[in-house]
Image: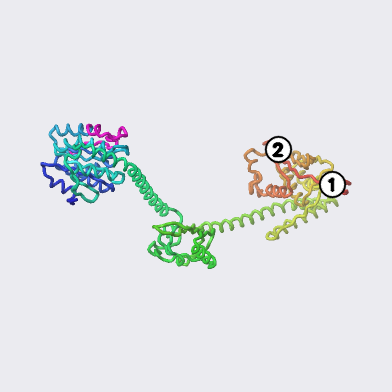
Amino acid sequence: MEKTDSLHTLLQNQDHTDSIQAYYTYTERKKYLNHAFQFVSFAIKNDYKVVCIEDDSLYQDLLSQLSLVYSDDLLKNITFYDSSEFYLASNVFKGEDHSSKLLNVMKPIVSDGHHLMMWGHIKFANEKAILQQLKKFKDYCDPFITEHQISTVCAMNGFNTPAYIQTELLKTHKYFMTDDEITKSGIFKMGYYHVEEELEKKRIHMIEQQNRQLSIDNEKLSNAYELLSRQKKEYRKLLTELPIATFITKSDCIVYANEKALIDLELPNFEFIQDVNVFEIIQFIDHSIKEQWIQSLQSNQDFQLKEVELILSNGQVKTFELKSMRTWYQGGEAILHVLIDLTPYKVLEKEMIRSEKLNIAGQLAAGIAHEIKNPLTAIKGFYKLFKLNMGKEFYYKIIDDELNRIEQIANEFLALSKPHSNVFEVHSISKIIQEVKTLLETEAILKGNEIITSLQKSDELFIYCEETKMKQVFVNLIKNAIEATTNGHIFITTKLRGENVEISIQDQGCGISETTLKKVGEPFFTTKETGTGLGLLICDKIIDTHNGTRSIESQEGVGTKVTIRFPRVPNPLSPTSVES
């Protein structure tokens, strides 16, 4: 084929006694749009009318470019039809019907005495006998186009137009266009489709039959190519925008690194590390881990470390989670390395540990102060009684017990870093309650309250407990009842309920609101002006270590009832227990 000049030059130099008819097979949208712009611009400059049968999206882009150069009045010379609706409205390309449709578009324009140019993007489905339909289409349209010297460009997608279709179209078009050049068609034959020979019909039918599958395969390959190209772009975009440090190595050399990798490794730019050995960039504090990493990579195994310290090029030490895995990059095997910067989390973790230590120390100090206040109150009260010569020998034992309790609490504070082992033994719950009542009775009387006990036979209610801790629980609970009540009664009841020993402490105090009741037991939550908010929390922990349960019922203005249950154990001094 003879190569010619550009489309614009060809249009400028055309013989006005003849017309240009070109078949255009395109593959690149940008170049295709440029050719369409040249074609329509030539028509507008020469005051020709233009029929443009094109994809709507592409026509809108074409119109946008034309509007930058030509006025709206000049752009009215263009008549536009959507190619899909024009050719595929019935989903079938019919040569006779579509040629009539096209002639009906061209005839009125030519009849009005206008010069006409036509840019057409022909579309057809992959149906059988398409070549026969194209033959009919050209058979009807070509005489009119030739007679009225209409310059045309017939465009088809080069990706999905079969070669045999292109060959036949070159026989009816003077010029063959691609995205990059224009040549004269070497097989152009004037009036080719007017020769209807039986042999030619059979040849065309055979070509269509043989190439139908090729057309389908070509479309599949084209779709696969577009899909692969899109996937590659998306994969690259994913790596680039991923908010995790990622880089790729080939033969231990870095060939790719995203922006996050440069930031986390504190590198100036990619050129600084491109083609550099990865073992020079990533330096482990622990050299044994580095050896494991290298060995894994060289043996084609994936490698992962949940936490590893790396020395950066600026000497800073950072903590990362590292994962290296096999992948494919730029046509060859490669290794994808992912680094998650854990440094901010490690700093936060240290701060949280420090804060937790301070919190525990604060809770412990407040709890100890709270617990020491109770026995001191009792000792101070009995001491005042002694001064008034009202003491009894029984009070000496209580004072002695409370001093021992203060000593134990102090020892627990000193033994913070050393485990404290409680001594669990079988004790009578009624006896413990009676001793606590004696301890707090004076405080109750000072508030005008009376403590009333209803204790089941002591030989029936035994629990396995640490006596001092159990007294600590009941001192807290009964003391709370005393403080909540003025000139009232505190009822303490012990009884057997199934396999459990049940203790209830009920007061006639102010009660607790439903909202406040939900918060009872939370650390540092208190309704008392001088309270620490740790008393009930400590009680709950002691009850829990004794396999017990605690519940609270309360009504504002009526009072509060606390119920505790512990597993019952047999009386160790009973005959049955001794025999066992």
Q: In front here: 567 or 538?
A: 567
Residue 132 lies, in percent from the top left, at 26, 37
Q: CA distance from mark 2 to mark 1?
A: 34 Å
Residue 10 lies, in percent from the top left, at 16, 47
Q: Are marks 2 and 1 in contact (CB under 8 Å)?
A: no
Q: In front here: 386 or 171?
A: 171
Mark 1 secondary-structure assignment:
loop
Tell me if 44 is positioned left or right of 539 in this view: left
Disc number for residue 559: 2
What is the number of callouts on the image? 2
Disc 2 residue type (three-letter): Gly
Tell me the colour scheme of the image: rainbow
| Relative vertical location of residue 387 with respect to residue 489 in this rendering, above or below | below
Disc number for residue 456: none
Query: Bounds of the magenta span?
Result: 72-100
Q: Which residue is mark 1?
A: 571
Residue 175 in view in this figure: yes
Disc 1 residue type (three-letter): Asn
Indicate whether residue 68 is drawn in magenta.
no
